Image: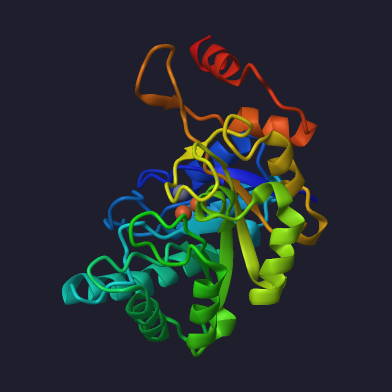
Amino acid sequence: MLLIGSHVSFRSGDQLVGSVKEAISYGSNTFMFYTGAPQNTKRCEIKEKLTNEALEIMKENGIDIKNVIVHAPYIINLANNENKEKYSFSISFLKEEIKRVEKFGVEKLVLHPGSYTTQNIDTGINNIINALNEIITPDQNVKICIETMAGKGTEVCFKLEHVKRILDGVKHGDKLMVCIDTCHLNDAGYDMKKFDEFLKEFDNVIGIEKIGCVHVNDSKNPIGAHKDRHENLGYGTIGFDSLINIIYNEKLQNVPKILETPYVCKEGGKDRSYAPYKFEIEEIRNKKFNNNLYKDIRDFYEK
Ligand code: FE
Ligand code: FE
Ligand code: ZN
């Protein structure tokens, strides 16, 4: 069965209940959320009552919590240890985040490996390994999924070899998986139009069974641009057919596919107001590109 969903919000008021309802409104059977704002580390207490209510709604709608993803906030940086305070904060935040994630019964936590900034790539990779060795406990249920990055600035893991070094360097490597992001891979220089070749390479370097999540995004930039700007499906340089080909790849059948495509602005506006996911998931299910996407979305939300 196709496992398709999107990034959804998580608010302190209704917590997972709100996230689930949003996912269902898009026609999803999985979803991804941050346990608070993606750009900060303020977190509220997880309320068991709301979690249980959400799990009940999920059951009624055929959503398995095992396919749901949590994304760690992106200001967490394990790759630089020159700023000691920030490095140790990142480590202790992730330890707490794993506990929060386990309260939901979620089993996959996506993590941006980080940027080495003032240091160098080898030091960066070692910093990540050392941090993960402090964070991971052998009895945790959660798998940390290292996300493949675009190579913007000093980001680590824009090459599969970087990811491999981390997987090999971490003591409890069985607690690590990989999240592949199609926009990031394109921007890193991997050709998503030749996905079978990419998968073969992935299998040789890392092992295909390590793919725990796929972020499905088109890219605003050409292959190898090292930019990381997501685009709606079929409106970027990867293209609709190539993305459909990835989504329906037999070897990734049981891996959740998550959309992180940009929200759509009001006509002539600049604020990204409308979630595109209901429409993009429909396109994916029909395997048919909607060349009227932006108009359809505005009509739907403004009617
Ligand atoms: Fe990400
Ligand atoms: Fe992503
Ligand atoms: Zn991105």
Pick the residue in front: 101 or 123: 123
Q: Residue at x 49, y 12 (%)?
A: 302
Q: Residue furthest top?
A: 303
Pick the residue in front: 42 or 261: 261
Q: Residue at x 74, y 60 (%)?
A: 197
Does residue 86 sit above or below 237 in this rendering?
A: below
Residue 292 percent location from the top left of the image: 63, 16
Does residue 234 sit above or below 96 in this rendering?
A: above
Q: State which quadrant residue 126 falls in.
A: bottom left
Q: State which quadrant residue 245 falls in.
A: top right
From where the camera sits, is residue 76 visible? yes
Does residue 160 sit above or below 190 in this rendering?
A: below
Would residue 120 be found to the left or right of residue 83 on screen? right
Give the colouring mode of the picture.
rainbow
Residue 140 percent location from the top left of the image: 51, 80
Q: Residue at x 33, y 72 (%)?
A: 79
